Image (tube, grey):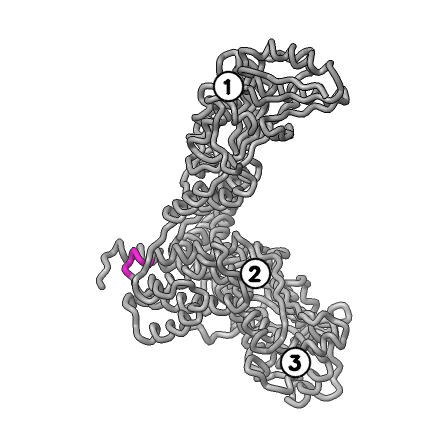
Amino acid sequence: MNLDKDMQEALATFITESRELLQDMEAGLLALENEENRETVNAIFRAAHTIKGSAGLFGLDHIVRFTHVVESVLDALRGGNLAVSTELVAALLPCCDHLNSLVRDVADGKLEENQDMADSGKPLLAALQPYLKTPEATETGVVYRDHAERVGTIAGNAIGTGNWLLFLQFNENCLRDGMDPLAFISYLTTIGEIVDMTTISHAMPDAGNMNPESNYLGFEVILKSEVAKESIESVFDFIRDGSLIHILPLENRIPYYVELIGSLTEDNAQLGELLLKSGVITQRELEEGLKVQQTQAEAQQLPARIGEILVDQRVVQQPLVNAALDKQKEIQNNKIRENQTIHVDAERLDKLIDLVGELVISTASASLLAMQARNTALREVNAEIISLVEEVRDSALQLRMVPIGTTFSRFQRVVRDVSKELGKDIKLAISGAETEVDKSVIEKIGDPLLHLVRNAMDHGIERAELRTAHGKPAQGTLRLNAYHSSGNIVIEVSDDGGGLNRDKIFSKAVERGLVQPGTALSDQELYALIFEPGFSTAEQVSKLSGRGVGLDVVKRNITALRGVIHIDSAPGQGTMMSIHLPLTLAIIDGFLAGVGDASYVIPLDRVVECVELPVDDNRDYMELRGEVLPFIRLRQLFRKNDSVSRRQNVIVVEHLDLKAGLVVDRLMGELQTVIKPLGKLFNHVQGVDGSTILGSGEVALIIDVPTLLRQVACSGNAL
Amino acid sequence: MQSLTIEGELTVFTAAYQKTLLLAFLNTGDELEINLSKVSEIDTAGLQLLILIKREAAQSGKDLSFIMHCKRRLATSELPRFGQAFGEQATFAHNEE
């Protein structure tokens, strides 16, 4: 199949959307497992429905065929013909996966079904068969049933058996005017059947005041009728003036109308329109309600909402108005989402960020020149430009920010599957899902998180027997949390398991020769050992973890993101791993230092303090408040051979409890700078994170503090 | 037991007259019976008159019942249906009977 360019673009959109929808679907299914919720069922159904529809547009028949079966099951679920069960969710989840694979194939350009996929899809569909009432509609013969049809049937049913409740309080003069209420009621029998009728006579005054020619009676009629509300209403056209006539769907019909309203596919939904569309109110009732609203507005009162007015005027019941309001909100939400989300090519965004970065550098150089030129006016203007550029930069970076929730919710599935695999009952609690973080960070944090989650589930959380024995709830809890903390995002993976076993870690470390027996280690030092390559204390190698592969990778990945990982653990209470990551990878706050004629940027979050180098007697350490502080001489490190300046300074840097002093010539203050990665050629260069261009046009290297500190730690061991 | 048979129509056209008649009848005793079998036509005005008289009787502690041909007592709640039995205008089919 050949697709032209437009089609290709549309297909790309289809792929993106389908992936999002499938993600929603998966999240929805997992949510259903915990709590059955109509809205969720509807959302899942809509997702499947949309995928099927869009796939049809592209002639992706195999996707249509597959999704159709899934959709049919979901439709049954939605219609209440099927109850949510763990088995059903278990059957549907692999279908989601399969659809994902199908969509991925499409993304890879495979528009036709391939045999492997077809084979792997069959057992999934077979698993859905028990949930389908009409098996013949599955394999071939795809039956399209859209919303409109569905609305039709609901509407038909509702009115077909529809009962109406009529409140009739005719005006007092109707008898004198020759109109007999009973005659009208009797006329109702021509359009339906009167099931019940009650006379309301409490408006009638006592005998002395009662005028026998005035009408005091009201009637409550329950009518079973096939006709629309308008037709019933039109019966009372002649007598409406001065009369109270309310025609309401009978209480027990309300659920039907609620569903009907819920299934309306209106684009522009005013509340009244929705109610009108569903047939619970008539055009006249709506107009009257609007008129009341208008009058109130003109009278300078706060006009009531149309829903309130309609309920007030007893043309419709509150639950129906509520249903319509919900629907309205749903439509508005969809609209807002449509309006507010645009898909932007990540590359374009990166290009923008890059340009903004250059802009930051240019403004820095402009302000430097202004300073040198001693031109106050220029400096003032420049200051304004800088503040604007900073705002532009912030909002440009904001563009890349995405809530971490999507990443978190993926773990619902992981936790579910892994806990099944491990035979443990573990629930996932998510908080801080709205915390935003740079997209590039999100992309890279998934794998480390996965390792941590699996590790916590496998090693952290004990088996149910052990938990109950320790007086803990049998169900283990894994918690994912995220929050912002001073320019960092902190992601916590915690469990309420047994905590880290100090002794076991220590003996294992001794066994592996990582520490000398008898060494006194702080908690942090000890816990850090579990991130050593090949380190595992699990006695039993399970399928998931325990092979010692994973945690060292986690640490590597996080370090690569300029992040750190902390462990807190309490025996018997659980373990918390917190990952601190910079919010964005593109820009850092740095500390500028000079050595000779070169400048270096040290990430500010690593800098603890700056001190003057007392007397340089060529030692590689100094005493700082009673502690020994090892040095790293940048001059030596970068092999600069120019003469040492008379006064040198020490920048104290810290990373994971490792501390060292960087010896530099000049301290040049803080700056915010854009990181430019070094070329591939310099991949092997250690101790440098990237480069940046300073305002003066100079290139400055960004120091990779963690790596340097590790080197010092190694050489320190050798000392 | 006092008994009153209403003859002819019981409609808005006769309501004023019937009202005085019925109220007067109410004063004739404590156990009262109104025979409606001779009523040729009844409308809302007639119906509410019967409801009124029933209410007045109840308020003054009198026992009033309506009877048709078969001397069956009618409950007030049955009055609307009872109304159905009279007159062409007020006739409507009722399946439950």
Give, as a three-letter code, the residue at label 1: Asp
Chain under label 3? Answer: A
Residue under label 1: A180
Residues beneath discs 2 and 1 located on the same chain: yes
Spatial CA span between label 3 and label 1:
108 Å
Q: Which mark is residue A582?
A: 2
Query: How many labels, in total?
Result: 3
Q: Nearer the viewer, mark 2 or mark 1?
A: 1
The tag earlier along the polypeptide, 3 or 2, is 2
Spot occupied by residue A450 in the image (x, y as percentages of width and height): 54, 71
Q: Which mark is residue A220?
A: none
Q: Residue at x 47, y 22 (%)?
A: B89
Residue under label 3: A716
Does any portion of residue A514 appear in the rendered image? yes
Spot occupied by residue B96 in the image (x, y as percentages of width and height): 52, 38
Spatial CA span between label 3 and label 2:
29 Å
Considering the numbered disc 3 on the image, is that residue within a helix, a strand or a loop? helix
Residue in the foreground of this view, choosing between A577 and A522? A577
Write down the quadrant of residue A52 in the picture.
bottom left
Image height check: is A323 above or below A451?
above
Q: Nearer the viewer, mark 3 or mark 2?
A: 2
Q: Quarter of the image containing the C terminus of chain A?
A: bottom right
Q: What range of the chain is rendered magenta?
A: A55-59
Considering the numbered disc 2 on the image, is that residue within a helix, a strand or a loop? strand
Q: Quarter of the image containing the N terminus of chain A?
A: bottom left
Give, as a three-letter code, the residue at label 2: Pro
